[in-house]
Amino acid sequence: MIFNDLVDAIGHTPLVRLRTGPPDVTVLAKLELQNMFAMKDRVARAVVRDARENGVLAPGAPIIESSSGTMALGLALAGSLLGHPVHIVTDPRIDAITLAKLRSLGCSVHVVEAMTANGWQSARLERLESLREEYPGAFWPRQYTNPRNPLAYATLADELVADAGGVDVLVGAVGSGGSLCGTARALRRALKAAGRPEPLRVVGVDAVGSVLFGQTDRPGRRQSGIGNSLIPGNLDFGQLDEVHWLNDHEAFAATRDLARDECVFAGNSSGSVYQVLKHLARTSAPGTTIVGILPDRGDRYVDSIYDDEYWRRTGLNELPISAEPRHVAYGTEVGGWSWAQVPASPRKRLVFVESNTTGTGVLALARARDLGLAPVLLTGNPNRYPGIGEADCEIIRCDTNSADALAAAVRAHFDAAEVGGVTTTSEFYLEAAATLAESLGLPGNPPEAVRACRHKTATRRLLADAGLPQPVAVPVTSVAEVPAAVAATGLPCVVKPVADSASTGVLLCTSAEQVRDQVAKLLSITHNVRGQAVPEEVLVEEFVQGPEFSVETIFADGELRVVGITRKSVSPPPSFVELRHAFPAPLDEDTTGEIEKVVRSAVEAVGLHHGACHTELRLTPAGPVIIEINARLAGGMIPELVRLAGGPDLLTQQLRAAAGMGLELLPEPQRTAGVCFVTSPAGGRITGVHGIEEARLIGGVAEVRISRGPGDLVRTATDAYDRIGYVIASAGSVEELDRALDSALDRVTVELAND
């Protein structure tokens, strides 16, 4: 077969029968060391191609990674051939051959000088961070957490099934966790698809002194490419049945045995796997097929594994060596060849149907990982999300505006038991997420309840049936219906889309002519900013006057819990742009109780019963009036205000709810927190934003963030998309909070040039 280049040639490695074991047990070696450099060539190709396709890696942008060997070489191959400068951060343990290969391929190699708190690994990561500051826009593949690492081994699994037919036991070394866990997961799926769903036993091989499987870190271990001083995100314990540990003496001796007995000149990872393969061959039932993955060649170990003088100099012979492994309880400290069963703790996937494009969206993906979940982003356009490359999530492209396409994408990639929940941080995909969750039998709100919240006419109908206070509202589908609508609502009135977000298209109208113009404008819009068809209907609504509040709630154990009430400040009419929030709102007990009672009834009326919801209302002399109900967390950084005020982390709790995990709502707000949004004083092109650092020095200010910069076009705010930044602060009272926000906002100035 002729390949277009070396990148396409990666994989297709031979599967060879070994001579070890009884004749009625088949022992096969997958010679991944036959790749151009080693097994991780597969990973390098996958992560670089994926990053380029998803816009995370720009054409010609640098690649920076921490690696002591094979991943570095794989990136040198894939990155260089695809036109990217490659920077590798390593430590003094790197062998001369690998160093020579990297430099000959044009890589910039950065060698750290000393270990830090968590060994060489942490020292390398600290150096990597400084390089990222030096090379803004560089891509960090994050081999230890990048989901493309384990996913890259789907091709390896397919090759095993094609060549061996069935596999009973899979054995592999564990370093980042990607190769063995990724191959195991894909192999189970491939065997099932091939009509061989028999249980697959997966055996991991680790180094004595590695922390991966409940052991104490010993930074002085000499094995390379196996073990770790940190727990990598790609180590999925649920994929492994047992683990074997070998010390340096045992691993190096087994590597020499592999060369002598099987004529495979390999590295210590392969030697350790070979030692375990021999043991399993002796102890397995007749008819068993065992496959071991041999990841690396031995050329980089000529001065260590294959050098008698190195053994004498390092005292390697003084370490104990065992002919058979000792069975121990998981967590028992070991010093030589031992094995233990791995406690089952599979990592569930949390599927996100798109996301919002602010920091909260990417933050939610990171929080999912913190919960032990593996985030998966279903998206039609990954380029929409700045910072997605930092989120360590699996990205699957599909038509997210199609319920069938969403369900097909999930089922094509995962078994039902692997998916723990479905969610979204985007208003536009709430119904899609609910529908997908329902189709998979996962926790969520009824799609019809979410649809009713998204479609304001339906909300109005349900609230009216429940006899709850709300504005007089008339849906119109043509300009001809405007006079009757105005007669019902009176003037001034509010014209709004029945299904949109961020106050888009909402306008206070003072004349029938203005109502007609706004209705005509909204009816002419056929699709929203996400390319979704919008209802051919507009809502003409009574203008309810009074201060605006929102109520933050979440369901826990089937009960609607009120987390608190937020005071909201919006721009003067005719637009309704949210400019400032304070949490909790300064309300007396009676008013609070009245608001909570109405909100509970409203949430019940629309049929929500799961996760977070956010209800907006105005407080009139006659009492609270419901403006809208959202089947989601509040936007406008309100969840962050709740957390900063001492309340629960609502973003994390919403993710827990989506994954069917118990909620933790114990903290009660102890302070007041608020946000004020930065807007442009006029339209034009930004030439500079000043005073940010001064604003950060104001007492109580927790964060100042500006999302626009020089060269960006801006306009005066007519909806939330026109806001260009925000200031978050906390204080002991609302009065102190407002002073801090005012003071910080006064210091931030936006300079404009008129084009």
Image (cartoon, rainbow, N blue to C red):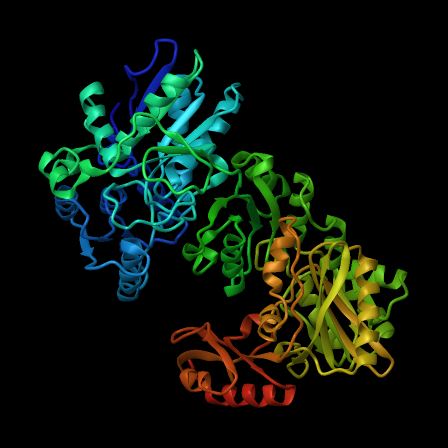
- As drawn, 101 above or below 32: below
Q: Quadrant of the C terminus?
A: bottom left
Q: Taking 501 as reference, is 463 left or right?
A: right
Instruction: Name the residue rendered at 63%, 43% in the picture.
Output: 403
x%, y% of residue 714? 48, 76
The residue under the point 77% across, 77% down is: 618
**Residue 521 as seen in the image, left or right of residue 617:** left
Is there any visible trace of residue 280 in the rendered image? Answer: yes
Q: Residue at x 19, y 48 (%)?
A: 93
Residue nearer the viewer, 173 or 412: 173
Report if residue 358 is visible in the image.
no
- The number of numbered badges drawn on the structure is 0
Check the image and name the residue furthest to the left.
Answer: 309
Q: Nearer the viewer, residue 155 or 177?
A: 177
Residue 43 lies, with reference to residue 719, above or below; the image says above
Residue 247 % position (x, y)? 28, 37
Up/down of 569 relative to 401, above or below = below
- Of residue 324 and residue 207, the one placed in the foreground of this image is 324
From what the image shows, is residue 81 above or below residue 557?
above
Residues 491 and 426: in front is 426
Q: Position of residue 591 (x, y in %)?
A: 81, 79
Give the quarter of the image for residue 281.
Answer: top left
**354 with respect to 337 (left or right):** right
Residue at position x 23%, y 43% in the image? 222
In this rendering, position of residue 436 left or right of residue 617: left
The quadrant holding residue 734 is bottom right
In x, y percent, where is residue 474? 82, 66
- Quadrant of the image containing the N terminus: top left
